[in-house]
Amino acid sequence: MKFEQLIPNVYYVDISNGLKMFVDCLGFTIGHSEINSSQPFCVLNKDGLSIYLFEHAKLAKEHNPEFRFVTKNIEKVYEKVSASHPEFLHPNLKEVTLRPWGAKEFALRDEQVCIIIQQW
């Protein structure tokens, strides 16, 4: 058995908030868009990763996912994100920090998701 990708579904009350986090802040691109439909939806892509964003108020209230993105250059990612979108830096991990398990990490959050950027 072989899997090729894991693609999370992320639900927002307002999909534009997810686009600010993933497209504007993290540099994902929109690979498929039904944003202007009656049930807004889009597929985001970056570096072989995909995320499905949905506008669905009820499910957004039930799901608050946390993701980890692993990088080999956390300082460069931190520089870019902290300069362009400091409002997304998580107050509990707003700087690159060496964690007790040996990884460097910092975190982002919006009203729906928490994203941990990690480098081993």
Image (spheres, grey):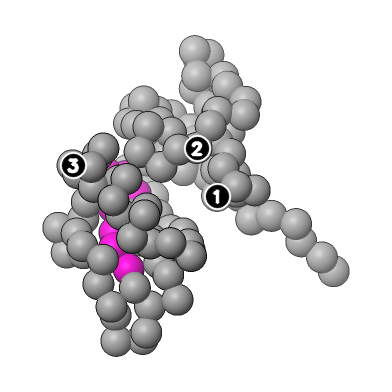
Q: Position of residue 37 (x, y in %)?
A: 53, 14
Q: Amino acid at mark 2?
A: Phe
Q: Which residue is mark 2?
A: 28
Furthest-left residue in view? 91
Disc 1 from disc 3: Cα separation: 24 Å
**Is 110 included in the stretch rendered in magenta?**
yes
> Measuring 36% from the left and 54% from the top, which residue is drawn there?
76
Kindly tell me whether residue 56 is visible in this rendering. no
Q: Within 10 Å of the Cα at label 1, are there few (<14), some (14-19), or many (20+) other Cα atoms?
A: few
Residue at the location (21% across, 55% down)? 90
Separation of marks 2 and 3 at Cα, in angstroms: 18 Å
- Give the labeled residue for mark 3: 87
Q: Is residue 118 left or right of residue 82?
A: right
Question: Residue 117 vs residue 50: left or right?
Answer: left
* Of the image marks 1 and 3, the number of the one nearer the N terminus: 1
Q: Is residue 36 visible?
A: yes
Image quadrant holding the C terminus, namely: bottom left
Secondary element at tag 1:
loop
Q: Quadrant of the N terminus?
A: bottom right
The segment highlighted magenta reads: 105-113
92, above or below 51, in the image: below
Of residue 40 and residue 102, the one placed in the foreground of this image is 102
For badge 1, the amino acid type reads Pro
Total number of numbered labels? Answer: 3
> Crowding at label 2, few (<14), some or many (≥20) Cα neighbours within 10 Å?
some
Q: Earlier in the sequence, mark 2 or mark 3?
A: 2
